[in-house]
Amino acid sequence: MSQISSVTRSKQQARSAYNKLSRWYDLVAGDFERKPRNAAIYQLDPGIGESILEIGCGTGQAIVKMAEFVGRSSKIYGIDISTGMLDIAQSRAKKTGQSNRVTLLCGDGTWLPFYNGSFDGILISFTLELFDTPEIPQVLAECKRCLRTGGRISVVGLSRKHPNFMTGLYEWFHSKFPQFFDCRPIFVQQSLESAGFKIISANDLSMMGLKGELVLVESPSNASVQAS
């Protein structure tokens, strides 16, 4: 995966940037992310009674939508690096009457503060490509640890599988202005396969000229022990 651009901004820089952007994030990225994010949710197909985690939950658009699927006795968990984004997500959950079903945590996907085998499903929407290349296997290893046997991960993200002019242009902006273009196209399906997941479905997307991947995978067996 040497073709993937590096992430040069620090976690603190990312946190600060998203804190500042949080009030305007849905206006800036809402139209671009909405349709593929919803496709990833429907692909995950959260069911009544299931426990679901979203990594990089942002302003909570997906969190409140998934809470409607799982019923009152279930929990939806979200983790994000930005407290500003989490404040918006918490407010959205309260306004939609979902706050009793939603638990939000500030943290980094390279270490998830949950017991092994805690979740039936995990959603990762335009987040995996925010991690630098060496961190992607760490994030997916944590996902594998936290999933129950047969659990699913639904991932949608920018793709470098079939690069075009827009891919190259976006990567140029990423290299010149990483504080504004901090994500970059990656090999989504390949990353999941390398992490040992079974591919259930994989589809290519086109998003305003940029290429994307929508992938659903199943987890192998996990040991149900407490996270260290």
Image (cartoon, grey):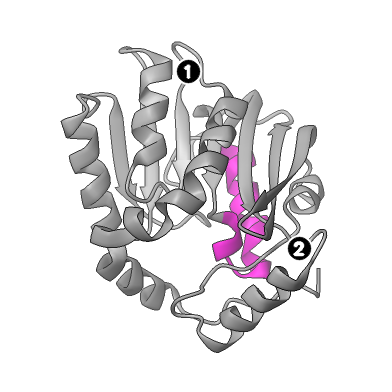
Residue on which the image places disc 2: 160
Amino acid residing under circle 2? Arg
- What is the crowding at mark 1: few (fewer than 14 residues within 10 Å), some, or many (at least 20)? some
Q: Which residues are magenta?
A: 128-146
In the rendered structure, does residue 84 fall within the stretch colored magenta? no
Q: Secondary structure at mark 1?
A: loop
Which residue, given by chain and number where applicable, does mark 1 sit on?
Answer: 50
Q: Which quarter of the figure has residue 138?
A: bottom right
Please tell me which of labels 1 and 2 falls first in the chain: 1
Residue 116 seen in render: no
Work out whether residue 112 or residue 131 is closer to the camera in this orientation and state it: 131
CA gap, disc 1 and disc 2: 33 Å
In the displayed structure, would residue 92 be above or below residue 209?
above
* Residue 139 forms part of the magenta stretch: yes
Q: How many marks?
A: 2
Q: Position of residue 56 (x, y in %)?
A: 44, 51
**Residue 72 in the image: above or below residue 182:** above
